[in-house]
Amino acid sequence: MADLKKRNQADRPPYARIRQMKRGSYDKETAYRVLDTGLVAHVGFLHEERPMVIPMAYARSGDTLYLHGASTTRLVKEDAAGLPMCLTVTMVDGLVAARAAFHHSMNYRCAIVHGTSRIIEDPDEQTKALAAITDHLMPGRWDECRPMTGKELKATGVLSMSIDQVSTKIRAGAPGDDEEDLELDIWAGVVPITTALGMPISDPHVANGTDFPASVRRAKQKFA
């Protein structure tokens, strides 16, 4: 197994190699489960030789990620020729309290993607991407909405990012205290962190008696 991990490391460019393999993996299906469950992606890129990281709404379709932003954002405006990017999605599942401060940690799931982005200019592909992003957040919501206008599509920037390299870092379970500390009279354990959607609040213009749409129920199930 160790030899296999070394070979997997060697097959990847230095920037995409996992430094600590203890919690790392290159398993694509594991990474895709994280991507499909997350809400926000933090996207890293270079702009005028300065590193930038911005949060973006996203969705995955096969081996492609779609990213949503205004057409005037620097990431979209500078992307005509394609940009190398790094994207990270992280979910924190718990605070890990150990007997020793050194062993405090967090339980988490993190997917890291390296790839190249391109701006989507074809209206049909742009619509498909926006539908995927909308339904990633609230499954089925796209079909509940009115169609986008040409003006709205023009004002919306959508990027397609190829998933060239993907990896995960995951920690779960109890604290890793040293054996000699286990008998200390100090509480240790995990404080779970849960992500859940609250009760929907209707817009003031929604008619009385209007039921919540199916997409709200699906979103609450997805992110429970």
Image (cartoon, rainbow, N blue to C red):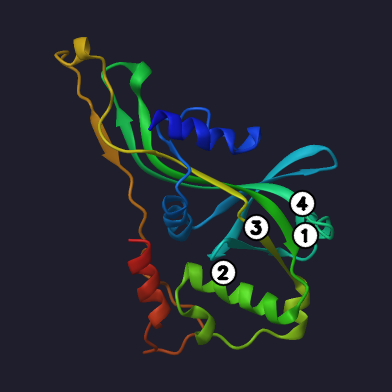
Q: Earlier in the sequence, mark 3 or mark 2?
A: 2
Q: Which residue is mark 2?
A: 133
The circle on residue 162 is 3
**Circle nearer the viewer, 3 or 2:** 3
Dot 4 amino acid type = Leu
Q: Secondary structure beneath disc 1?
A: helix
Q: Position of residue 75 (x, y in %)?
A: 76, 54
Seen as rendered, the residue at the extreme top is 180
At x 27%, y 27%, the residue is 175
**Disc 4 to disc 3, how far (Cα)?**
11 Å
Tell me which corner region of the image, top left, top right, bottom left or bottom right, holds residue 1: top left
Say few, some or many: other residues with alpha carbon within 10 Å of mark 2 (under 14 / 14 to 19 / 20 or more): many
Tell me which corner region of the image, top left, top right, bottom left or bottom right, holds residue 219: bottom left
Given contact means CB atoms under 8 Å apart, are the residues at marks 2 and 4 in contact? no
The circle on residue 83 is 4
**Circle nearer the viewer, 4 or 3:** 3
**Circle nearer the viewer, 4 or 1:** 4
**Disc 1 to disc 2, how far (Cα)?**
16 Å
Query: Would you place residue 51 above or below residue 88 in this image?
Result: above
Dot 2 amino acid type = Ile
Q: Position of residue 70 (x, y in %)?
A: 73, 65
Q: Earlier in the sequence, mark 4 or mark 1?
A: 1
Residue 71 lies left or right of residue 209; in this view the side is right
